[in-house]
Image (cartoon, rainbow, N blue to C red):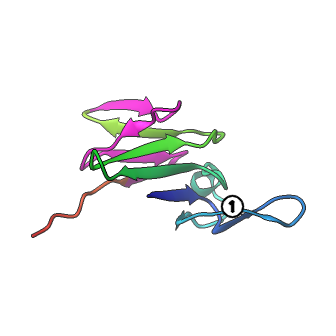
Amino acid sequence: SQSRYGRTEEVIDRHGRLVRRNDLVFTDQEDEVNLSVGRIQSRIEYDEETLHFTVFDENSRHGTFVERNGQIKAATGLRGIKLLDGDTLYFGLARCRFRLKSES
């Protein structure tokens, strides 16, 4: 399964057709942080065989990055980056913490 991330809930092409829906939406305001998140920014996929989440940038202008142990890596290419609990995700200038919910 996968979740999609971007600046608007629905991405419409120039002909008024729905291109995709985003599951996590950043507020579409005109400030530097929100404008750095693309309408089509990235996606996170969950692999039920390996039980891993992986983030992929979707050719966004400002990129998608993962910060772990003081190092920042770009989530580019076909392999993306496997996510670990506590990673910081950067969608352009916007950032959030990736947390795995415990079963307790």
Q: Position of residue 44 (x, y in %)?
A: 45, 51
**Dot 1: element:** loop
Magenta residue check for 91: yes
Q: Residue furthest front?
A: 49
Residue displayed at 28% across by 32% down: 70
* 24 w.r.t. 98: above or below: below
Figure disc tally:
1
Q: Position of residue 98 (x, y in %)?
A: 32, 53
| Mark 1, other Cα within 10 Å: few <14 / some 14–19 / many ≥20 | few
User: 66 or 94: nearer the eye?
Assistant: 66
Identify the residue under disc 1: 30
Q: Position of residue 62 (x, y in %)?
A: 61, 39
Residue displayed at 67% across by 56% down: 39
In this picture, residue 84 sits left or right of residue 91: left
Q: Which residues are magenta?
A: 70-96
Q: Residue furthest right?
A: 15
User: 89 or 57: nearer the eye?
Assistant: 57
Where the C terminus falls, by quadrant? bottom left
User: 99 or 29: nearer the eye?
Assistant: 99
In this picture, residue 25 sits left or right of residue 97: right
Residue displayed at 45% across by 32% down: 79
Magenta residue check for 64: no
Tag 1: residue type? Glu
In this picture, residue 72 sits left or right of residue 4: left
Q: Position of residue 67 (x, y in %)?
A: 35, 38
Q: Which of the 4 quarters of the picture holds residue 71?
A: top left
Where the N terminus falls, by quadrant? bottom left
* 7 w.r.t. 95: above or below: below
Q: Which of the 4 quarters of the picture holds residue 82?
A: top left
